[in-house]
Image: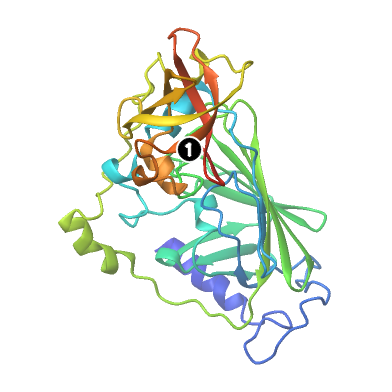
């Protein structure tokens, strides 16, 4: 109840929106950024963001939104690689399909988002599942004794005209995108918001999560103001309940994390391949084990048969490499690395069929 009352009070205090934040007029998107009474940039408005279901992808969209992706492969720890390879939203369920909160980074991708702001607070209203986050911007310390949550404990402060929001105390269940890049409960997420003009927000996030990644990872994104868009009610369970009951969507019943790599074990994990010896191999598929442990194809190269270890099937499907694409008799080319332990085995980083190359890491 306290949270609800606080949100109502904040929303009431934002009744006077900055010039151009109304449906009655079309703002000049190149005009200077609006300001709050305290002189800081006002990020209020409805914002279009780039689709970033896979944070390693760089996109520049015609509507002005963009994402500068983190280079693939990500710098996983052994534990982080296991979470990445073990993630199977089809078999284990995706928490988003069960209408759980998305967490910060994944929330910035689907459906419209509105920001409301005053001198002391900034509120993010996500149409997706009618989620919201309300963040104090006065440099308050993190709260003590609060339970871990999907969005973590978020506090904001200003560095000049840049709003910085730091979040920690996560439950470790959320992913960084639909494809499933992991984060742990030990993560610290720092988000930077700049408004260079009326029409854009420059957004950067940095995740420092030493349990999952060997160094901090980040994305740089551009949001674009859409003053003619309004948020709608989003009843997630209303649309998904029957599908969950029928199990056409697998229910998410809690994390299925394992400290070990369930799909590749220790014999086929990346450290067992010589990454100093990349090989480009072209040949014909002679056998396919798309959903094997590990997933693999047998490739005939210069009259020799090689075992080519592939990516998890759910990752290949997400990147549009279906089981139908990997048929016996198909000519392919792979960028792969030889096993240090198993003769005649390589692990593929990419596969090319025709003119289409798919990343597998």
In the depicted structure, whether residue 296 falls above or below residue 167: above
Instruction: Report if residue 185 is visible in the image.
Output: yes
What residue is shown at x 27% (from left), y 63% (from top)?
Answer: 240
Q: In the image, what residue occupies the spot 61% across and 76% down?
A: 13
Instruction: Report whether 135 appears left or right of 297.
Output: right
- Is residue 147 shown above or below 25? above
Q: Quadrant of residue 309?
A: top left
Residue 205 drawn at (x, y percent):
65, 47
Give the residue displayed 48% in from the left and 37% down from the top: 182
* Figure check: 211 above or below 112: above
The colour scheme applied to this rendered structure is rainbow
Q: How far across and down, in percent of the image, does residue 263 sit?
A: 35, 26
Viewer-closest of 38 and 265: 265
Residue corresponding to mark 1: 182
Quadrant the N terminus occupies: bottom left
Residue that protrudes farthest toward the front in the picture: 303
- In terms of depth relative to the viewer, which is nearer, 22 or 85? 85
On the image, the x and y values in percent for residue 86 come to 37, 32
Residue lying at the far bottom in this picture: please name it.
24
What element does badge 1 sit on? loop
Residue 165 drawn above or below residue 213: below
* Residue 232 picture location, percent across and down: 44, 77
Give the camera-side residue of 112 and 124.
Answer: 112
């Amino acid at each position: 109840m306290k949270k609800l009352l606080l949100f109502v009070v904040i929303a009431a205090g934002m009744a006077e929106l900055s010039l151009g934040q109304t449906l009655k007029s079309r703002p000049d998107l190149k005009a200077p950024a609006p300001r709050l009474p305290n002189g800081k940039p006002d990020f209020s408005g409805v914002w279009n963001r780039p689709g970033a279901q896979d944070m390693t992808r760089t996109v520049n969209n015609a509507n002005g939104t963009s994402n500068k992706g983190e280079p693939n492969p990500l710098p996983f720890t052994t534990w982080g690689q296991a979470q990445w390879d073990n993630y199977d939203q089809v078999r284990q369920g995706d928490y988003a399909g069960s209408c759980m909160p998305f967490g910060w980074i994944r929330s910035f991708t689907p459906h419209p988002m509105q920001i409301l702001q005053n001198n002391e607070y900034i509120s993010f209203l996500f149409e997706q599942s009618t989620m919201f986050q309300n963040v104090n911007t006065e440099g308050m310390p993190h709260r003590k004794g609060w339970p871990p949550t999907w969005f973590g404990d978020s506090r904001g402060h200003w560095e000049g005209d840049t709003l910085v929001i730091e979040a920690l105390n996560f439950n470790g269940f959320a992913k960084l995108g639909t494809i499933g890049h992991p984060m742990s409960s030990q993560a610290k997420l720092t988000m930077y918001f700049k408004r260079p003009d009326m029409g854009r927000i420059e957004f950067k996030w940095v995740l420092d999560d030493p349990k999952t990644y060997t160094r901090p990872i980040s994305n740089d994104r551009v949001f674009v103001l859409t003053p003619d868009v309004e948020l709608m009610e989003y009843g997630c369970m209303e649309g998904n309940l029957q599908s969950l009951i029928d199990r056409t969507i697998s229910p998410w019943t809690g994390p299925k994390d394992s400290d070990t790599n369930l799909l590749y074990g220790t014999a086929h994990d990346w450290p067992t391949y010589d990454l100093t010896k990349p090989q480009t191999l072209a040949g014909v598929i002679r056998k396919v084990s798309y959903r094997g442990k590990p997933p693999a194809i047998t490739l005939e190269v210069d009259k020799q048969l090689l075992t080519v270890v592939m990516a998890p099937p759910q990752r290949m499907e997400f990147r549009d490499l279906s089981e139908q694409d990997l048929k016996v008799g198909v000519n392919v080319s792979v960028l792969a690395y030889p096993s240090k332990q198993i003769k005649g085995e390589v692990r593929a980083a990419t596969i090319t069929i025709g003119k289409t190359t798919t990343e597998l890491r």
